[in-house]
Image (tube, rainbow, N blue to C red):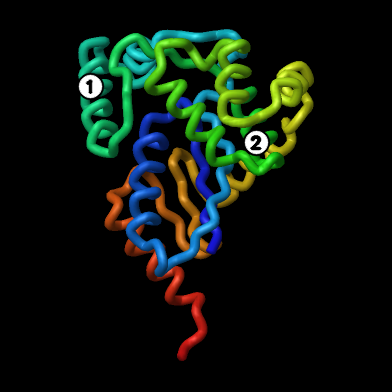
Amino acid sequence: MRVDIWSDIACPWCYVGKARFDKAVAELEGKVAVEVRHRSFELDPDREPGDVDAVVPMIAKKYGISPAQAQANEYKLGDLAKLEGLEYRTEGRDHGNTFDLHRVLHLASERGLEAPVWKAFYAANFADEASIFQRDRVIEVAVGAGLAEADVVAVLDDPERYREAVRADEAEAAALGATGVPFFVIDEKYGVSGAQPTALFAEVLEKAWDERQPAT
């Protein structure tokens, strides 16, 4: 049973939501067989490449709140991430354009390394001190997750590589009515929006799986 997950590396709720979803899949091991396909979605598609900001002032400006409120939100997200067994830097993170990251992730999908590269990019953005929005860091993390350096460099050097693949993912998300992420489509039948609790993911997965099985 295929599950399509639209998400962005810069999205903390995607980071937390994917961990909750993974726990649901683990709980249903032996009952439900799931194939995950990661899909591209940019939270900030109009940001210019190389335009990198600190997260807290960016959030404050975007949502019209004070820097103190934005920082408090980061602390809350850190607590939620910790509950899911995730590392999360609540101070000093940055934010930038993720289009090149998505292009590299499509390369990873083509090479059969989709899951480890997504996981590595998430960890690099939310847990590591070095910025994932620097070219050398993107290459380092992608290679560490199993991609060949020459392949990653070739994608970064050619802005047309996987451009249409990213745009196609985003167009499909728009057609489905997804205005934010994470957005899960289970067996092309059920949509789940947001970082829902693990129990809800498990419930929908079981329901979709039972409905597709022939009666005995």
The correct choice, above or below, for 200 with respect to 60 in the image is: below
Q: Residue at x 51, y 27 (%)?
A: 121
Relative to residue 196, is residue 162 drawn left or right? Answer: right
Relative to residue 160, is residue 44 drawn left or right? Answer: left
As rendered, which of 149 and 84 lies closer to the eye?
149
| Residue assigned mark 2 | 108
Q: Quadrant of residue 63?
A: top left
Give the number of marks. 2
Q: Residue at x 48, y 34 (%)?
A: 119
The correct choice, above or below, for 202 with respect to 50 in the image is: below
The correct choice, above or below, for 41 with respect to 189 in the image is: above
- Residue 201 position in % (x across, y down): 35, 56
As rendered, which of 67 and 141 lies closer to the eye?
141
| Residue assigned mark 1 | 75
Q: Could you say whether the residue bearing mark 2 is in a helix, strand or loop?
A: helix
Q: Amino acid at mark 1?
A: Tyr
